[in-house]
Amino acid sequence: MKETRRLERVLKYEAHRVKVYEDILEQSDGTVLHYDYVKNRDGAAILLVDDEEQVILVKQYRNVEDRVLLEIPAGILEPDDESTEITAVREAEEETGLIPEKRYKIGNMINAVGLFDEHTAVYVGKELKKGARHLDPEESIDLVRIPFTEALDMIYRGEIYDGKTVIALLGYQDLRTRGLF
């Protein structure tokens, strides 16, 4: 493998949430490469599972796909958040009105490692308690409660394909198989 080093990072565009850079790289053989790099804030997401093994998903319009998708609650870390777990719990309550008393971290993910730097911590939440739903002004979210096994089937039918949601559902299945849930 050729060694690579960054020569320069040039800001090309700044929006309200992201900054787009051009990275100029040099490989050990002298080849110069140009790559795009998008800087975004990190986030957290959580799969909520009730006592009947139903999952609570959020249904919302996503402009990138120009359609409504099913996902797990998620959001970006706020400056006052002490941890990704706090972010996940906050987003669960904001988007669903539910607070998971028991939480397990599945892991961290990066959606598009060749382009974005956004890391998302993925959790499973159980022992759901009633909280207060309070959506952000720009959010329009419906809640969908479906059996966990049906949600798994929806992955294989191509109906659920959001990365963090797929990871959370498959991760929860693995935890169940191992007897951790």
Image (cartoon, rainbow, N blue to C red):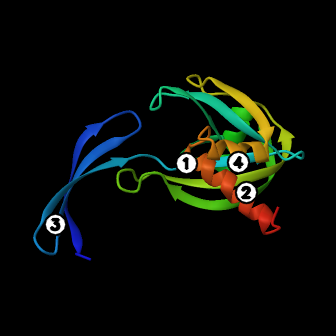
Disc with the residue nearer the chain's start (4 vs 3): 3
Distance between mark 1 and mark 2 Cα atoms: 14 Å
Q: Amino acid at mark 1?
A: Gly
Distance between mark 3 and mark 1 Cα atoms: 31 Å
For numbered disc 4, what is the local secondary structure? helix
Distance between mark 2 and mark 3 Cα atoms: 41 Å
Q: Amino acid at mark 4?
A: Leu
Depth check, front residue: 39 or 34 = 34
- Left or right of residue 161, residue 118 in this image: left
Q: Amino acid at mark 3?
A: Glu
Corner quadrant of residue 73: top right
Q: Which residue is mark 4?
A: 152
Q: Which residue is mark 3?
A: 26
- Left or right of residue 35, residue 73 in this image: right
Nearer the camera: disc 4 or disc 2: 4
* Residue occupying the point 55% across, 48% down: 163
Nearer the camera: disc 2 or disc 3: 2
Disc with the residue nearer the chain's start (4 vs 1): 4
Q: Which residue is mark 1?
A: 163
Instruction: Find out whether the residues at labels 1 and 2 contact each other: C-beta distance under 8 Å.
Output: no
Instruction: Find out whether the residues at labels 4 and 2 contact each other: C-beta distance under 8 Å.
Output: no
Instruction: Find out whether the residues at labels 4 and 3 contact each other: C-beta distance under 8 Å.
Output: no
Q: Is residue 167 visible?
A: yes
Figure check: 11 above or below 5: above
